[in-house]
Amino acid sequence: MKKKILIIGQGLAGSFLAWNLLEEGHSILIVDDRHTHCSSLAAAGMVNPITGKRLVLSQRCDELLPFAKNVYQRFETRFNRKFFESKKIIRLFRDAQELSEWDKKSQQPHLTKYYGEKKKAGTWGSLINDQLGSFFIEQGGYCRKLDLLNCLTHYFHETGCLRFQTFHYDNLKILDDHVRWNNQDFSQIIFCEGYLAQNNPWFKWLPFNHAKGEILELTTRNPLPDAVISCGKWCVPFGKNKYMVGSTYSWDHFDCQTSQAGRQKILDAIGEFIHVDFEVVHQLAGVRPILKDLNPALGQHPEYPHVKIFNGLASKGLIWGPFYARQMTDYLINNIPLDAQVNITRFTK
Ligand SMILES: Cc1cc2nc3c(=O)[nH]c(=O)nc-3n(C[C@H](O)[C@H](O)[C@H](O)COP(=O)(O)OP(=O)(O)OC[C@H]3O[C@@H](n4cnc5c(N)ncnc54)[C@H](O)[C@@H]3O)c2cc1C
């Protein structure tokens, strides 16, 4: 049976979910406050399968990464635009431990497709400080998430599925077998509101551990290699002599305001590994919606089955978003159980 579903938030989570539901013929209404509190707008767009000091492969990468790329390809066909750019990632070694992690991991047959060739110090000339050498992270790249979000916003709005306004919790009526908002009945409401879920009366009990982040957009006089450069901080190319660099992490103050301190932190950090003249043209800030156990949060309210959440995409919205939006869709429409690891029942049992 076709459903009428209310979605709060049109970041990556709400957009991917809404798209799936529309494709399956359901009727949706998305309410978004014009991205006033949107992490997806501040994301650098990096799709990086290997992160952290221990060079850890992103969870379920063999499944989630090809899934995401396939979804971006389908959006490209649909909107006749290029969204995903495959790019090598030059990962600079920072210490002996990282070199030893690469030695171990690059030997494992199931990991060789991600842990690419090692390069000796000095490979990247005077523009990049690679004094301990580097290696290529394979299979990653860059998603033009702003273009993608703009296409989706436009599409949802044109088709009457998106309303630009702030959703107020008080205006929601939860009835026995559906919910009512603005004099309209919906079979379900799905909250995809990013970090603001911390204020949601039905979900604020979840153990959030959000992290605010800032990034800078730069133009350089000389081009850097056509690759993402990463060493804790990163530099992502997204046009001729245009780069996104970042990012900061802070756990004590949540808003989407940029700061001078954030800007300086990024400039200090990238000055350590990129030696090129540049100009800062833009600064962005957002709050990554993160759960304490670092897994996404999908599922239904323990008392109100028509009230649901899709959140917690952390720093991985572009790799995780498409896969978990599919899982949320199958759960909503076909009652297919969610993975225990992402189901919010893990916090109530
Ligand atoms: C600095 C930074 C860099 C990042 N870089 C990357 C990266 O390179 N790669 C990557 O994969 N991920 C990255 N991320 C993480 C990524 O941004 C998130 O995983 C993802 O965007 C979360 O999407 P979301 O839809 O859950 O939340 P959001 O994008 O925050 O969307 C929530 C939406 O809901 C709206 N909303 C909330 N409450 C209401 C309300 N009451 N009424 C109406 N609307 C409401 C908000 O305004 C917003 O539009 C980065 C994050 C930050 C902050």
Image (cartoon, rainbow, N blue to C red):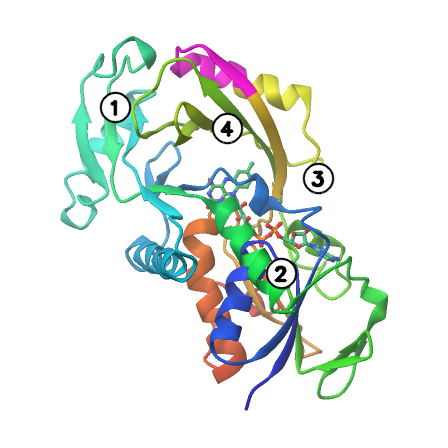
Task: Give the amino acid type for the residue marked by disc 2 in the picture.
Answer: Cys
Q: Secondary structure at mark 1?
A: strand
**Earlier-in-chain disc, 2 versus 4:** 2
**Earlier-in-chain disc, 2 versus 3:** 2
Q: Secondary structure at mark 4?
A: strand
Task: Give the amino acid type for the residue marked by disc 3 in the picture.
Answer: Phe
The percent coordinates of residue 320 (x first, y second) are 44, 55
Residue underneath mark 2 = 192
Q: Is residue 267 left or right of residue 103?
A: right
Residue underneath mark 4 = 246
State yes or no: discs 4 and 1 in contact (Cβ < 8 Å). no
Q: Which numbered dot is residue 338?
A: none
Span of residues in magenta: 267-280
Q: Is mark 4 within 8 Å of ligand 1?
A: yes
Residue underneath mark 1 = 134
| Residue visible at 60% across and 16% down in the picture | 264
Residue underneath mark 3 = 254
Task: Give the amino acid type for the residue marked by disc 1 in the picture.
Answer: Ser
State yes or no: discs 1 and 2 in contact (Cβ < 8 Å). no
